[in-house]
Every structure is written in structure tokens, then in C-alpha cells.
Amino acid sequence: MDVMEAIKTRRSVRRFKPDAIPEDVMNEVLEAARWAPSWANTQCWEFVVVTDQAVRQRLSEEALSPGNPARRGVAEAPAVVVALGKEGISGFYKDSPATDKGDWFMYDVGVAMQNLCLAAWGHGLGTVHVGLMDAVKIEEILGVPKGTRVVALTPIGYPAVVGGSPPRKEINDFVWRERYGAKYTP
Ligand SMILES: Cc1cc2nc3c(=O)[nH]c(=O)nc-3n(C[C@H](O)[C@H](O)[C@H](O)COP(=O)(O)O)c2cc1C
């Protein structure tokens, strides 16, 4: 699958078959995260791969609200990848924030997660970025040390159901030419 096809056909998957993910496939997916770009190549990300059914159940029930459409998938998928970011590294120069944005860990971890999700899709695996969760509860469940934050997670597994494609804005709805507000016609 080429890059553009993966980007355009990837969908958020929230229902999974129970089939386990072969170790070599999971390693390839993690390899995609490994090669993500990051602030000054600081690579502030870490990942916890959870396959234990009881822990996935806890993540689903204790950290995701009943209204979260990904909740069932977290318990159902054979694995959950929890993405962590180490604070105070990305976006810092000599211990001070280098920009008005402060810590860039959310950005770097997001870039790595999307690499992971696209690689997973290329291997026939479904994922869904999950941000609506109790990150502090997950840090407690997984024993994440202080200074390292849970950023997002994704269930990962072979899709049982793949939904339709939610619509996207047109390019000329979000791209400006030369300066803000000037129409861009692709
Ligand atoms: C940062 C982020 C957080 C998200 N959080 C959730 C979530 O908590 N639960 C969920 O079901 N989907 C979540 N999503 C998935 C989006 O709803 C989904 O990407 C969007 O509707 C577009 O659909 P698509 O991924 O199939 O193209 C999240 C996506 C992103 C990027």
C-alpha cells in the first residue's frame, strides 16, 4: 500500500476480531513509530503494549467513559498501545521552553502515533486514536512514573467492522494562499 492510499483509506476502527497480532507485525508497527520525526530528534515518546485481557478491561471500564465510542474496542482488541510522552524534553533548549508553545511532547507523540496507525493499516490492522480518557487513571494502572504522561492510546487488532469515511473539509476551506484569509484554489 503506498503512502497516499494508506492516508486516505485509513479509518478509525472500533470493533475488532479476537485474533492475536503476530509479534513480527507488531514490531513493524512499532518500528514506524520509532522512525517518526521529533523535536531535535529528542524522541520523548514511550509506548506500553498491553495484551493482558484484565488490564485492557480495566483501561476500558475505568479510564474511558461509557459514551466514548472506542470503549468497547479497548476491551475487545487483542492489544492496546498506550502512548506516553516525557515532559520537559521536546521544545526545550537548556531546560527552558524554546517557543511560546512550551512543551512539544503532545505534538511529537501525535506524530509517532499517526505513523504507528498508518503502518498498522498497511498491515491490515485497525486502530483509533483515543484522547477522551482519564490519563491520570491510566498512569496509575500502568505504573507510569512522574514526569511521563499518558498522551493517547489505541486499541489495535484485525477489524471486525470498518465504518464509512467521515467527510473532510475541502482544501480551499482550510488553506490560504500567501497570507491568512486569501483564497486558495487548488
Ligand atoms: C487526538 C484524537 C483524539 C481522538 N479521540 C477519540 C476518542 O476518544 N474516541 C473515539 O472513538 N475516537 C477518537 N478519535 C477518532 C476521531 O473521532 C476520528 O479520527 C475522526 O472522526 C475521523 O474519522 P477517521 O479516523 O475514520 O477518518 C480521536 C482522534 C484524534 C486525532
Image: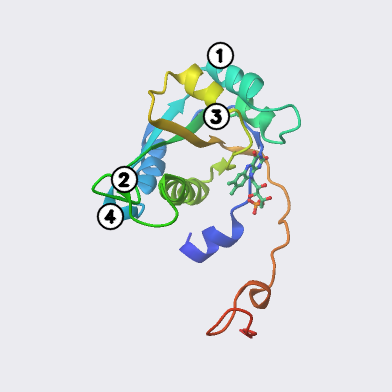
4 or 1: tag closer to the N-terminus:
4
Q: Does residue 119 appear left or right of residue 91 in this picture?
A: right
Residue 16 lies, in percent from the top left, at 63, 33
- Figure check: 61 above or below 133: above
Q: Is residue 104 visible?
A: yes
2 or 1: tag closer to the N-terminus:
2
Q: Kindly identify which residue carries mark 1.
A: 54
Neighbours of disc 1 within 10 Å: few (<14), some (14-19), many (20+): few
Residue 46 lies, in percent from the top left, at 37, 35
What residue type is disc 1 on?
Ala
Q: In the rendering, which numbered label is found on residue 43?
A: 2
Of 25 and 107, the residue lying toward us:
107
Q: Is mark 1 within 8 Å of ligand 1?
A: no
- Cα distance in 3D space between marks 2 and 1: 30 Å
- The local secondary structure at tag 2 comes to loop
Residue occupying image coordinates x 39% and y 25%: 146
| Quadrant in which residue 109 is drawn | top left
Q: Kindly identify which residue carries mark 4.
A: 40
What residue type is disc 2 on?
Gln
Residue occupying image coordinates x 47% and y 24%: 50
Display coloring: rainbow
